[in-house]
Image (cartoon, grey):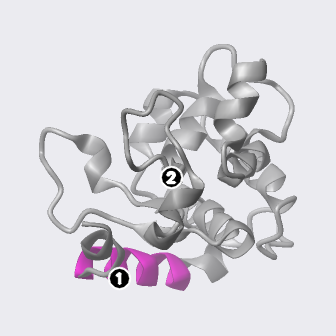
Amino acid sequence: MDRAHADNPRLSAWLDEQREGFADWSRHGGGWDFDERSLDRVEALVREHVTSADDLFAREHTPLVQVACWYVGEVHNRSRGTGWRLDPDPAESHPWSRRPYVIVPFDRLDEYRDPEGIDYDARPLHHPLSSFLGLLGEGAAAGTGALRAELDDYAPGGADEERDQG
């Protein structure tokens, strides 16, 4: 399944579309160098142009949101060694199966353990669109750094250990 999600026409088409749209999208804010700190600018951009979860879903297929999702995923890929995935045959009953995400490669499976021991695959994955939802909901922190903080999830045991200590 991992291989099918990593290499398929749906994913290739989506990635090509975002790469092509990046030059125009990059006029928002500037300085888009795929550095971890640039995620703070993406966060500010999303908060400036999107007012709510409903607004985000209404704009989901616009270049502003789609290229922003691609950019966030590319920062993850370049800084943490993740890769893009997209279900080649998404289920109608599962809307998130239609959206791209980044995940640690399967060959690093043994670096991550489910603390409850239920799931054999505890690799962290991120749907950038879901990350944007976290910026807009009630109780969302007003400052910046939430998107950048997600990068900590890739340290083996990092996200679970931090939650256990919190």
Q: In the picture, which quadrant includes the C terminus? A: top right
Residue 63 in picture, x, y percent from top left:
50, 64
- Whether 37 is drawn above or below 18: the answer is above
Secondary structure beneath label 2: loop
Question: In the figure, is residue 100 to the left or right of 34?
Answer: left
Callout 1: SS: helix
Please rate how many residues cluster around mark 2, counting C-alpha atoms within 10 Å: few if below 14, some from 14 to 19, many from 20.
Answer: many
| Mark 1: amino acid | Ser
Main SS class of the magenta portion in the image: helix
72 relative to 162, above or below: below
Residue to which mark 1 is pinned: 12
Q: Give the percent coordinates (x, y) of residue 120.
A: 38, 47
Residue 160 relative to residue 92: left or right: right
- Judge by depth and name the residue closer to the eye, 10 or 157: 157
State how far apart marks 1 and 2 are (Cα). Answer: 23 Å
Q: Is residue 16 magenta?
A: yes
Q: Nearer the viewer, mark 1 or mark 2?
A: 2
Left or right of residue 166, residue 107 in this image:
left
Amino acid bearing label 2:
Arg
- How far from the left and from the top, in percent, is residue 16? 43, 84
Do tag 1 and tag 2 residues touch (Cβ < 8 Å)? no
In this view, the residue in front, 80 or 87, is 80
Specify which label sits upstream in the sequence, 1 or 2. Answer: 1
Give the magenta part as a residue range. 9-20
Q: Does residue 87 show up magenta in the picture?
A: no
Q: Which residue is mark 2?
A: 123
Q: Residue at x 84, y 38 (%)?
A: 144
**Above or below, comparing residue 89 to residue 135 in the picture:** below
Q: Nearer the viewer, residue 140 or 158?
A: 158
Q: Residue at x 75, y 30 (%)?
A: 162
